[in-house]
Image: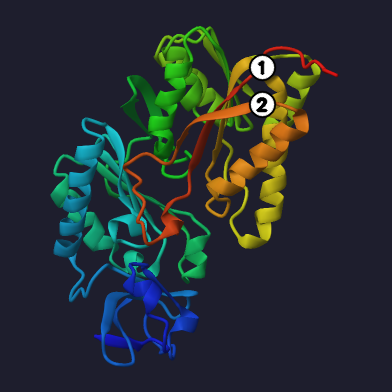
């Protein structure tokens, strides 16, 4: 097996459990086929771990959480079985869930979502791409009732690994849609053209939270995609739930999901969310609950400043729409924007508008997207719920 020597004093982070070895942490970058299994050692011969080596990538080695001797179908069967055990404990009885969440399941560069009897796979790194057949065989072993396996390898990160973009069925008869049940709601998932793997499973629990707050309320769901938060609100008895999204395909899918569940109190509109919210402010609208679930605003550190500006404008406009006693749900999936940064944005915008906000719930991605403590990169979703506390009485000046 190829051995890679760490530079002096570069092992501490890795020994604490981080799974990425960067190029500049290695003494040299030998030529090898991307995805080659390699052992990382310190100068005194201590084995830090084994992982997939890619001389083309900034992340030179993606460790597999131990000194792995062989990667084959049996290796993936063992890892998939362990991952399934966790999901069965934390989200029992779900028809759709994330089976593999990359580094959190000690499989850096691999994402697998299960939608009923269809598996959707994303291979972000050369090592996983090289073992595609083993991954397929392992899935068929662990899930003997699977009908199809689909790959959605269209992420730009693959180019950094020297990989081509690729998507489509890789085993079985691939359906155009898969029907799942989430929080008692029928959702039709478009696994071929839908965003990410077809549906945003990471907000599953948070959508339930919003639903519980919604009976009798008017709810505005911004960046609604195929209806998630609005559908949960409507199902739980919202007086009205409106979803906004810039994608006509998403809006059409959301309306179809509402009809599928006979939710006449939900409707959806195609619009640019920023423009739409400004127009609602100008029209003097107020809402009981405003949900903000925007896409990632920053994929690199150079984009953080722009992301902060975007979150600031979005939350500021949403605050203007809140009725006294209303609820603001502010979410961010930008990994580079931490929860403390998002809280600071909300603090500044609330102060600017002289709105008194009270945080009463915070959360993260659903438990089938676990967070590896040694890798902060695995925690990306922030979910903050505030109520708008109205002024109780006018301030008086006393001499």
Percent coordinates x, y for residue 271 in the rendering = 68, 27
- Quarter of the image with the C terminus is top right
Residue 202 left/right relative to 332? left
Residue 167 appearing in the image:
yes
Please tell me which residue is depicted at 67% across the width and 13% down the height of the picture: 392
Residue 121 left/right relative to 155? left
The residue sitting at the front extreme is 399
96 above or below 334? above
Mark 1 → mark 2, Cα distance in angstroms? 7 Å
Can you tell which quarter of the image residue 207 is in? Answer: top left
Dot label at residue 356: 2
Residue 34 appearing in the image:
no
Disc 1: which residue? 390
Q: Earlier in the sequence, mark 1 or mark 2?
A: 2
Percent coordinates x, y for residue 312 in the rendering = 70, 40
13 above or below 91? below
- Quarter of the image with the N terminus is bottom left
Percent coordinates x, y for residue 9 in the rendering = 42, 85
Please tell me which residue is depicted at 32% across the width and 69% down the height of the picture: 130
């Amino acid at each position: 097996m190829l051995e890679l020597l760490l530079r002096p004093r570069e092992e501490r982070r890795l020994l604490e459990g981080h799974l990425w070895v960067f190029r500049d942490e290695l003494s040299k970058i030998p030529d090898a086929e991307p995805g080659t299994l390699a052992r990382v050692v310190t100068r005194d011969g201590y084995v830090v771990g084994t992982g997939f080596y890619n001389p083309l990538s900034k992340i030179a080695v993606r460790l597999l959480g131990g000194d792995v001797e062989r990667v084959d179908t049996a290796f993936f069967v063992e890892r998939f079985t362990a991952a399934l055990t966790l999901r069965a404990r934390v989200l029992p009885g779900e028809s759709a869930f994330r089976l593999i969440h990359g580094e959190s399941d000690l499989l850096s560069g691999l994402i697998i979502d299960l939608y009923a009897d269809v598996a959707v796979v994303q291979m972000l790194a050369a090592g996983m791409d090289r073992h595609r057949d083993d991954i397929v065989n392992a899935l068929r072993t662990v899930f003997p009732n699977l009908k199809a396996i689909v790959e959605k390898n269209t992420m730009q990160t693959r180019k950094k690994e020297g990989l081509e973009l690729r998507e489509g069925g890789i085993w079985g008869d691939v359906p155009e849609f898969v029907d799942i049940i989430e929080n008692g709601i029928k959702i039709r998932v478009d696994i071929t053209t839908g965003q990410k793997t077809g549906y945003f499973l990471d907000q599953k629990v948070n959508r339930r939270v919003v639903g519980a707050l919604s009976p009798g309320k008017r709810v505005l769901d911004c960046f609604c995609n195929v209806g998630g938060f609005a559908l949960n609100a409507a199902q739980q008895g919202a007086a009205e739930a409106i979803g906004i999204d810039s994608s006509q395909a998403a809006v059409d899918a959301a309306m179809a999901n509402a009809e599928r569940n006979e939710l006449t109190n939900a409707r959806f509109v195609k619009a640019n969310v920023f423009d739409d919210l400004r127009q609602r402010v100008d029209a003097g609208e107020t809402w009981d609950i405003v949900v903000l679930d925007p896409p990632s605003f920053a994929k690199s550190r150079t984009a953080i400043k722009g992301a902060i500006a975007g979150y600031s404008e979005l939350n500021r406009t949403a605050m203007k729409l809140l009725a006294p006693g209303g609820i603001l749900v502010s979410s961010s999936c930008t990994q580079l924007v931490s929860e403390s940064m998002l809280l600071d944005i909300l603090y500044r915008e609330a102060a600017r508008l002289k709105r008194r906000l009270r945080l009463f719930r915070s959360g993260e991605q659903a438990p089938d997207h676990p967070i590896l403590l040694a890798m902060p990169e695995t925690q990306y979703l922030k979910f903050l719920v505030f109520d708008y506390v109205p002024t109780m009485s006018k301030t008086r000046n006393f001499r």
